[in-house]
Image (cartoon, rainbow, N blue to C red):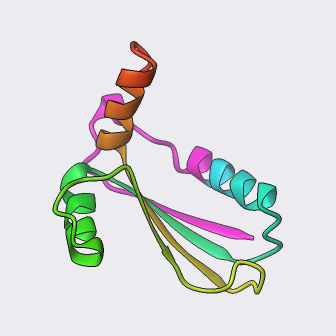
Amino acid sequence: MQVRVAIDRSLPARLSVRAARVRRVAAAALRAEAVPAGELSVRVTRDPAIRALNARHRGKDRPTNVLSFPQGAPRSGGLLGDVVVSVDTVATFISVVRPGKV
């Protein structure tokens, strides 16, 4: 199982993300779903980028926390798909659910 991680350079220091941690969390999620093999790409970005993707692919002109773009059957191996995460929206959610944690 391979997890490729791309982290936008525009992330502010207070919202920094480590690629190794993203890779571990994604790999654990795939194992929990019993996905035996495959490749997953994860992009960590900001609200403007995910808003543009959300508008283009879902017709919703607003940011969201996560977008997923499945490519293949989860049990077939090969390319599983892409996941895009906005640290801005995730941080806002966390600040509401768990104040003081961001």
Q: Check residue 96 for magenta coloring.
A: no
Q: Nearer the viewer, residue 2 or 102?
A: 102
> Horizontally, is 18 left or right of 56 in the view?
right
> Horizontally, is 37 left or right of 57 in the view?
right
Q: Residue at x 70, y 78 (%)?
A: 74
> Horizontally, is 55 left or right of 27 in the view?
left
- Give how far across and how far down residue 95 sits, in percent: 36, 23
- Looking at the image, is 18 positioned above or below residue 55? above
- Give how far across and how far down residue 56 sits, in percent: 22, 76
Q: Residue at x 72, y 61 (%)?
A: 30
Specify the quadrant of the image occupied by residue 35. bottom right
Quadrant holding the N terminus: bottom right
- Give how far across and how far down residue 34 sits, in percent: 83, 65
- Give how far across and how far down residue 83 sits, in percent: 48, 65
Q: Nearer the viewer, residue 88 or 9?
A: 88
Q: Nearer the viewer, residue 1 or 69?
A: 69
> Horizontally, is 13 left or right of 51 in the view?
right
Over which residues does the magenta segment extend? Answer: 1-22
